[in-house]
Image (cartoon, rainbow, N blue to C red):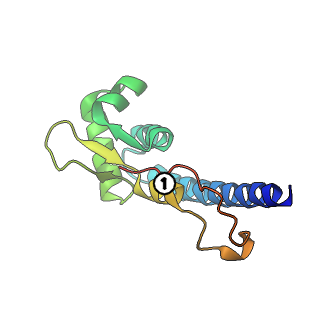
Amino acid sequence: MAYYLEGVDWTARQTTATTIKLLELFNSDRERIVGSPGGRSTLRVYEEIQRRVIVSIRRVSDSLGISIPTVTSSLLRLEKMGIVRETTGRKYGRMFAYDRQLAMLNETGEETTSSEPAGNGIARGPRVAL
């Protein structure tokens, strides 16, 4: 029983730490966007990519009811700010990823071994990849 409780404790600590880091990232990026030109539509697009992590221009346009040119310019602004990255290298059908959010979701927690039970063999859950 202690073995499983250690695993539950470790998982809860890692989830809490990841959540705190994500909230800090979201708040920091939000502040940068609000102070930038085109902030209102860019902020709406940013909030959508927070929810989906990887998006296409068409999907954001459909989800938010914003024109494709507006979504495109907002994503390009976010790319210039280093918040998102275009992943396809194509002119059409481009996809954008929120890399720092992906990186945080992919962390295994092995960097903070002091709170991890030794040799518990507990699966860390699925990793998110592009």
Identify the residue at image location x=35%, y=49%: 130
Residue lying furthest left: 91
Choose between 24 and 1: the one closer to the eye: 1
* Left or right side of 73 for 19: right
Residue lying furthest right: 1
Residue 48 in the image, given as x and y percentages of width and height = 46, 37
Q: How many marks?
A: 1
Check disc 1: other Cα within 10 Å, few if <14, some if 14-19, many if 20+.
some
Identify the residue at image location x=43%, y=42%: 49
Residue under label 1: 101
Residue 43 in the image, given as x and y percentages of width and height = 45, 42
Residue 40 in the image, given as x and y percentages of width and height = 44, 40
Label 1 amino acid? Gln
- Looking at the picture, does residue 75 appear above or below residue 121? above
Residue 123, image quadrant:
bottom right
- Looking at the picture, does residue 2 appear above or below residue 54? below
Residue lying furthest bottom: 114
Identify the residue at image location x=49%, y=44%: 50
Choose between 35 and 22: the one closer to the eye: 22
Identify the residue at image location x=32%, y=46%: 96
* Left or right side of 2 for 118: left
- For the N terminus, the quadrant is bottom right
Residue 19, image quadrant:
bottom right
Secondary-structure class at tag 1: helix
Residue 119, image quadrant:
bottom right
